[in-house]
Image (spheres, rainbow, N blue to C red):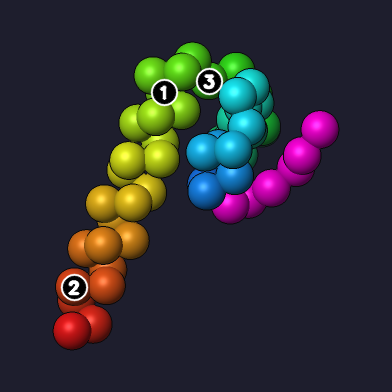
Amino acid sequence: MVISHLHAVAEAVDDVLWVQRTAAGSQARWLTREQRRALIEDHARSGLLGLADTL
């Protein structure tokens, strides 16, 4: 088991349990392969966009 706040960890782990804090409390769900891939791509895009803002 790996517990991490780093999205990049999702690239190396097949089974990802995503935990989110909400106003009603924490919610946990297993990500599908497609959800995991989308998370990685979204994180990469946002990082690249943030990098472009600094240039």
Picture residue at 33% right of the left edge, 61% below the top = 47
Q: Main secondary structure of the magenta part?
A: loop
Which of disc 2 and disc 3 is earlier in sequence? Answer: 3
Picture residue at 41% right of the left edge, 40% below the top = 40
Tell me the quarter of the image containing the N terminus. top right
> As drawn, is 37 to the left or to the right of 9?
left
Picture residue at 26% right of the left edge, 51% below the top = 45
Relative to the observer, which residue lies in front, 18 or 20?
18
Q: Amino acid at mark 2?
A: Ala
Q: Residues within 10 Å of mark 1 (few under 14, many from 20)?
A: few
How many tags in the picture?
3
> What is the number of the mark on residue 35?
1
Q: Amino acid at mark 3?
A: Leu
Q: Pointer 1 and pointer 2: residues touching (CB < 8 Å)?
A: no
Residue 22: % across, % down? 56, 36
Q: Amino acid at mark 1?
A: Gln
Q: Residues within 10 Å of mark 3 (few under 14, many from 20)?
A: some
Residue under label 3, please give it.
31
Residue 30: % across, % down? 60, 18
> What is the number of the mark on residue 52?
2
